[in-house]
Image (cartoon, rainbow, N blue to C red):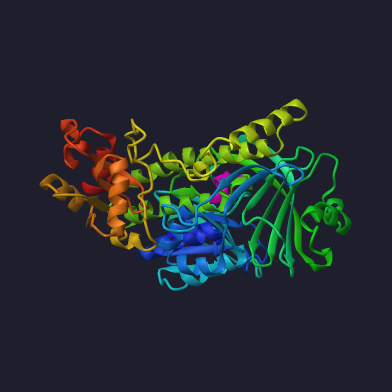
Amino acid sequence: MPTHAQHVAVLIIGAGPTGIAAATLLAQRGVETMVVERHRGIYPLPRAVHLDDEVHRILQKLGVADEFAAISKTARGMRLVDGSLETLLELRREGVGEHGWPQANMFDQPDFENLLRRNLAGFPAATVVTGAVATVTRSVDSVVEVELVEQDSGESRTVTADFVLGCDGANSRTRDFLATTMRDLHFDEPWLVVDVRCGVSLDVWDGVYQVCDPSRPSTFMQIGPDRYRWEFRINPGENVDELASEDSLRALLAPWFREVPWEAAQVLRHAGYTFRAAVADVWGRDGVFLLGDAAHLTPPFIGQGMGAGLRDAANLAWKLAAVVDGTAERSILDSYQEERKPHVTQIVRAAVAIGWVMAGGKGFISQARQSILTAVCRVPGFSGPAMKSISPRLRAGLLARRPVLARNPVGLMFPQQHAGDDDRLGTGFALVYRGEMDTHLRVLASALGAVEVLVGSDETGRAVSSWMDRHRARAVLVRPDRVVADYAKLGNGPARESTWARALVGSRVAANYLDRMIEN
């Protein structure tokens, strides 16, 4: 191994949103981080266009939530419509959810990436290298060796790191190094994506349309004041270039331009994509980890592709920082795959299900699907809450004590009534409690370096108390990524749950947190 190679704590391959988010979260904690990106600049055309309120909360932790709100547009949810654009089912989104931000946010990805990079530039611990291809060559004795090749000159150099994060997309070279395969979740279809700027506003509902037409399933959304996107499935025997010709595009978009002249539209781009559903078998080994599209591929139908990558970054970054600063053992990193893989698999399956609803089956099956959707739509109260729980709770990893009852808050995100409430929780662990905190609880909070937060009587406090009542909790231990790690039960429950210390005794939560973090 080279003796004079540059060394950093964490090297991140890929400067997309996932890579920059991970770098920011690490740099905020003073972890020396290098981001390597093969492109010189930011890709100028939009790709991802949606983030939900839970991911917006991650942006809050990055320090860019308000700036993102200024460049994004709130959407009202999703409509499943038939080929004539008649509504079959409407899944509404509230203006602001329990994470303190709008539940559906549409944006232009180049603007978003520029925002993330400008923000990262404010952290001295992070360095961004562009125009270089990074390849993991080997990992020996807890040191990962990476070769960097300058694209212009062809010159190469070696950088070593304690950890490498592969945020290098669907064709990840880092995944090749791990020699892992992608588990196929049975969705693989070619689609045409069309982005349009229109000088005249289209008369459309303020949300996402999923067109459930077996002959031509499609998606439509407004992503800005004058920006619109369509996605059309490419049927067998069709040619992408022919489908994207001016005459063909005009015919495909005609239902949306009944009241607006086609001449008002400017096609910004059209591109063919293969929408896939797959999850990597192995997410990390020997100090090398996969994040974002390198670890999972999600069809875009519920707008969770980019958000899944940002959730990866939020989950892994605080654990890496704890290992780097010596407050946790490397074994804590095993929980990254244990927690994130089942979570994202469930989300990918939900996206595949929406794909089936849009186009699955023909003849009788297609007619039955439409009848079922129409019937479901008539169920009182269905459409309101239907879009509130896209992100499932975490159920494994450090959260090894599987919740027995639905009321149990373990694995859920702790709520944020208003944007900024998270500031009260600090940047590490937080112990949120009501009433008098006993000695055992105080010892545990001190051992974890947790901020102690007494629930107040203001509006935020009342909202938190209401949430804790629903989950029968008198205190909750909140991780740095705002996931509830454990809780103390209301009332006089079993003796082992009467205090935090007793609640942890004999549980794997105790083994994971106390053994890995406190004793070290």
Q: Which residue is drawn at 75% across and 26% down?
A: 364
Residue occupying the far top of the picture: 364
Nearer-the-camera pick, 114 or 26: 114
Image coordinates of residue 108 in percent, x first then y, are 62, 64
Nearer-the-camera pick, 137 or 18: 18
Image coordinates of residue 7 in percent, x first then y, are 43, 63
Q: Which residue is drawn at 62% across and 32% down?
A: 375
Tally the numbered discs.
0
Judge whether 23 appears above or below 172 on screen: below
Residue 180 visible within the image: no
Image coordinates of residue 336 in percent, x first then y, are 42, 44
Nearer-the-camera pick, 329 or 305: 305
Is 212 on the left or on the right of 317, as rendered?
A: right
Residue occupying the far left of the picture: 439
Image coordinates of residue 268 in percent, x first then y, are 75, 65
Q: Which residue is drawn at 60% across and 41% down?
A: 351
Range of the magenta residues? 291-298
Please check the rendered image and state whether residue 296 is part of the magenta-colored stretch, yes or no.
Answer: yes
Judge whether 394 appears above or below 164 on screen: above
Is 424 on the left or on the right of 77, as rendered?
A: left
Is 106 on the left or on the right of 440, as rendered?
A: right
Residue 286 visible within the image: yes
Please check the rendered image and state whether residue 146 is part of the magenta-colored stretch, yes or no.
Answer: no
Instruction: Tell me which corner region of the image, top left, top right, bottom left or bottom right, holds residue 452.
Output: bottom left
